[in-house]
Image (cartoon, helix red, strand yellow):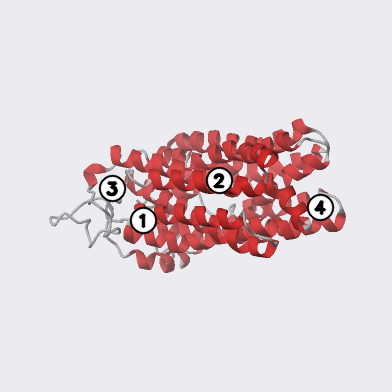
Amino acid sequence: MGEPGEHHRDVHQPDHRGRAAGGRSIASAAVTSATAHDLDSRRGWLAVVAAFFSSAVTLGTAYSFGAFFDSMAAEFDSDRSATAVIFGLTTFAFFFLSILTGRAVDRFGPRPILALGGVALLLGLVATSRVESLGVGYLTYGVGVGVAAACGYVPMVAVVGGWFRHRRAIAVGLAVAGIGVGTLVLSPVAAALVDRYGWRDTYVIFGVGGAAVLLGVCLPLTAAPPTDGRPSAARFGQAWASPTFRRLHLSASFMALALFVPFVFVGQHAKDRGVGPVPAAVLVDVLGGSSVVARVGFGTLVRRLGSFRLYRTCLAVHAASFLIWLVAGSSFALMALFVMVLGVGYGGFVSLSPIVLSDRLGVAGLGSVLGLFYTASGLGGLLGPPSAGWLIDRTDSYRWAILVAFALAATGFLLLLSLPVGADGRLERAADAVD
């Protein structure tokens, strides 16, 4: 589907040979074929369930890192900046490897991709539980969890988007709600397990349990979604050639530089102000919970208000939330309000970005398009938390790190203001667009 006035062929109309119009299926290695009649069907909802659990396990594990932060920093005698590099490298690996896994799911379907993610999560976390230096932990955790997340999120969101026509926004919203639920559940669970068993044994528990979930949810996925057969290999260049896509990517880069700072440091900030370790971990829990509500809620509002209008509002909310953190001081209530508002903006960004991109570029090869788009978040995850840690260490205060995060998030929102919005709330098709 495209912008008003575009004349893309219906991506789900099969030709007389049983293939999508224009060529072979994107996932030629899928176990069974799928046709336009399967859209919005039980097969699609099975993909939603698989995407929900895969994103919950992989990103819930990655975003629970704050619960391990103090224990690992103490054992390896590392400062905030050096310890935060683990999260930064993991996020970077996750989003940049999504270019490959997004392309792979277009070609081979979701089942082998999820199986690879389960194996990577198990090996990466078990290996991390055995490391004797932080540098080796960069590799084992960063590669293991990074590969797992790259397999469990972007490819599965693309698969869900391809399975739906009329209920796409709601389906994607429910699928990506898994990230919030995973964060909601795994962050306090990690804190409790670390307190009882230590961080090393907790990583083993997470590795075994997470791998079992990923391998389990890939079993019902017997087909890839229908496609129009357009060559997905060309989608990278096609997307990047669009000035609108590049503006969206730049905006997301600034947004992400700020976004991942609280995932690592809001709990540390609370503990430095006298909050206990489990209540401090609950702050990330609240962030995840509010993002779940936002992901599902915004998905239901897309038809009424328009995908891009909502998307832009979410980035404004995301930026404004840092002002609450700035004035929170020692107030746990204000910290909780901050992460709640942040979760709304962040959850909306996650649920709406696939919709905005598919509205603009269509669903064919959406895995590769999303993989390219989310490199913006990879850069933000790599640079944001370590830079914030460096500022906190040098100034012995969170104030400057929060101010910089606010400025970056606000820039991400301002970059969207010059993009034209149609009467339906979606991006207008630019005259020089190639999509």
The quadrant of the image that shows the C terminus is bottom left
Chain-order first, disc 2 or disc 3:
2
Q: Amino acid at mark 3?
A: Thr
- Residue 195: x %, y % from top left: 70, 39
Foreground tag (4 vs 2): 2
Q: CA distance from mark 4 to mark 3?
A: 50 Å
Quick check: 297 above or below 96? above
In this view, the residue in front, 80 or 262, is 80
Foreground tag (2 vs 3): 2
In this view, the residue in front, 104 or 406, is 104
Q: Which residue is mark 1?
A: 112
Q: Amino acid at mark 1?
A: Pro
Chain-order first, disc 2 or disc 1:
1
Q: How many marks?
A: 4
Q: CA distance from mark 1 to mark 4?
A: 44 Å
Circle 2/circle 1 CB separation < 8 Å: no
- Residue 281: x %, y % from top left: 69, 38
**Residue at (45% x, 55% y) in the render:** 119
Task: Point out which mark residue 222 bears.
Answer: 3
- Circle 4 packing at 10 Å, graded few (<14), some (14-19), many (20+), is some
Q: CA distance from mark 3 to mark 1?
A: 11 Å
Query: Element type at marker 2?
Result: helix
Q: Amino acid at mark 2?
A: Phe
Query: Taking the image as drawn, is residue 430 in sight?
Result: yes
Task: Point out which mark residue 400 bears.
Answer: 4
Circle 2/circle 3 CB separation < 8 Å: no
Chain-order first, disc 4 or disc 2:
2
- Circle 2 packing at 10 Å, graded few (<14), some (14-19), many (20+), is many
Residue positioned most to the top = 333
Chain-order first, disc 3 or disc 1:
1
